[in-house]
Image: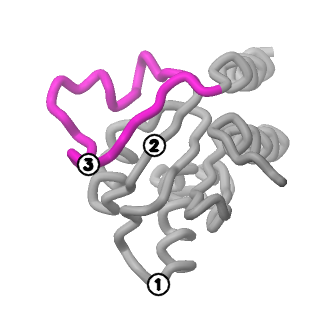
Amino acid sequence: MMIFTDEYFMQLALLEAEEAFEYGEIPVGAVVVLENKVIAKTHNLTQTMNDVTAHAEIQALTSASHYLGAKYLNDCTLYVTLEPCVMCAGALYWAQIGKIVYGAPDPKRGYSLINTPILHPRTEVVKGVLADGCQKILEMFFRKLRE
């Protein structure tokens, strides 16, 4: 029997981040899960799509909404390797995502920098899942970029 944990699904999001890294995208991966089933998985596509809004979370919301044929994701969990930015947090609010699990904090652009609650009041948030691995891939990417 398979045991599905936050760590299990975050590992899938990290695989997406690795794919983003390979394509020269900032390595952020996202997975949307409904009843222990992955219904969307993606990563940052801002360079590929030449679109500043093509963050992993936005791509995952769009994919999950298309899969379900619904705009609200109340029963879904988003696993993302980096704390969502304010733009993504706003989209997550409108999607009424049930739960957000993120890895690394984003001390420069993360939604938690805003003093006003920005997520839907019923959204549960879990922070720091596999944070070290999520942070490490970002550091490797930016180190490589500076070389």
- Please state which amino acid type lies under the numbered disc 3: Arg
Type of the residue with mark 1: Gly
Residue carrying label 3: 122
Residues in magenta, as a range:
104-129
Q: Position of residue 126 (x, y in %)?
A: 46, 32
> According to the image, label 1 marks what residue?
69
Provide the secondary structure element on which disc 1 rests: loop
Residue 15 vertical position relative to residue 133 in the rendered view, above or below: below
- In the rendered structure, which disc, 3 or 1, sits on the residue that comes first in sequence? 1
The residue closer to the viewer here, 23 or 96, is 96
- The prevailing secondary structure element of the residues shown in magenta is loop
User: Residue 118: image x %, image y %?
Assistant: 23, 40
Q: Residue at x 58, y 28 (%)?
A: 103
Answer whether residue 115 is magenta in the image.
Answer: yes
Which residue sits at x=57%, y=50%?
56
- Spatial CA distance of label 2 from label 1 is 20 Å
- Give the position of the C terminus as an image quadrant: top right
Q: Earlier in the sequence, mark 2 or mark 3?
A: 2
Q: Residues within 10 Å of mark 3 (few under 14, many from 20)?
A: few
The residue tagged 2 is 100
Q: Is residue 57 left or right of residue 19?
A: left
Disc 2 marks a residue whose amino acid type is Ile
* Tally of numbered tags: 3
Coordinates of residue 90 in the picture (x, y in percent): 29, 49
Whether residue 144 sits left or right of residue 25 in the image: it is right
